[in-house]
Image (cartoon, rainbow, N blue to C red):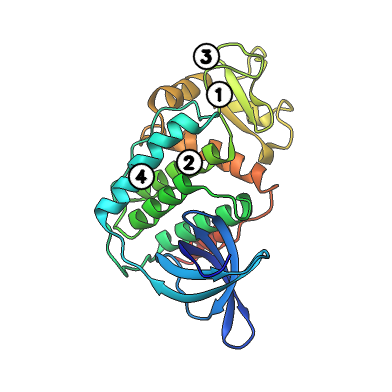
Amino acid sequence: MRNEALNGYLLHQRPYQEKRALYYLFSEHLGIVHGIGKKGAPLFEPLQLFATGKRDLKTFSQITISPIEVSQLDKGLSSDISNNSVSKKTQAASSTPQVLTPQPQRYQQITGQQQYAALYLNEILLKLLPVEDPAPALWHHYQHSLLTLKQSLSADELRLCLRQFEQNLFQELGFALNLTQDSMLDNIEADNDYRFLPDIGLMPIIQYPNIQHNDIQNTDQVENTNLQAIFKGSEILAMEHSGITIETLNSWSRLYKHLIDHLVDYQPLQSRLLWQQQQRYQ
């Protein structure tokens, strides 16, 4: 490419020589692009730039911050959601989540816990998306999430924003979560317990006499509990019926944490560590 105009957001940057930086850009039409440009480009702001180069590492020039219009955001989201429903061969089995509506404001900063949440979105994108593989629908959802994180949010609204983005990321990666059947293709039963294994799905747990649900994690039935999650059947059916809502938020958070951990090969996420340190010292 030569002087190709790109719109995007920086996911990460590292110093490169005295006056330049190595940038990891999430672009609207090319996906993640690596490049070198003049230092000083900000995170979490929409950027316009020109990219030149035939290899994996491009040269970025004329990097500027661009405004976002509300009509542009709404048009992009509605168009991508419509196209996604037709073109995606694998969709998550859950219902459409409650979507928070952001009010775009140029140059408004992301602060506090919401900054750690934005860093988390950047980190999982950088770890999970292939380089130069277009994902325009996910790009618009990412933009929507950043604008949401620039608003004043309650703790639950913040978690809703993250779970909604994770769901769109899983769809982009081709993961379909079956919440109506277990790994044996039997229907989920409200009174049964199930163990979620990312490579297998929901595995029914054999119940033994005198063992209650709350005691299961204290028995030898669960090996290496850090890599597994246990759900009540009624909990799973509520997730399937309602999608991502305030009422089902805790269940989705547990499920998606295990899936994210699996996808990053159980390597620690720096954004989570920073978030935990910030909580510890509050």
Residue at (31% x, 61% y) in the render: 68
* Mark number, residue 168: 2
User: In the image shown, does 174 or 277 lie closer to the viewer?
Assistant: 174
The mark nearer the N terminus, 2 or 4, is 4
Residue at (36% x, 41% y) in the render: 79
Select label 1 or label 3 by which is in front. Answer: 1
Other-residue count near label 4 (Cα within 10 Å), few / some / many at <14 / 14–19 / ≥20 = many
Corner quadrant of residue 248 = top left
123 vs 106, left or right, is: right
Q: Quadrant of the C terminus?
A: bottom left
For badge 4, the amino acid type reads: Leu
Mark pair 1, 2: CA separation: 15 Å
* Mark number, residue 75: none
Q: Which residue is mark 1?
A: 178
Element under label 3? loop
For badge 3, the amino acid type reads: Asp
40 vs 197, left or right, is: left
Q: Which residue is mark 3?
A: 191
Element under label 4? helix
Select label 4 or label 3 by which is in front. Answer: 4
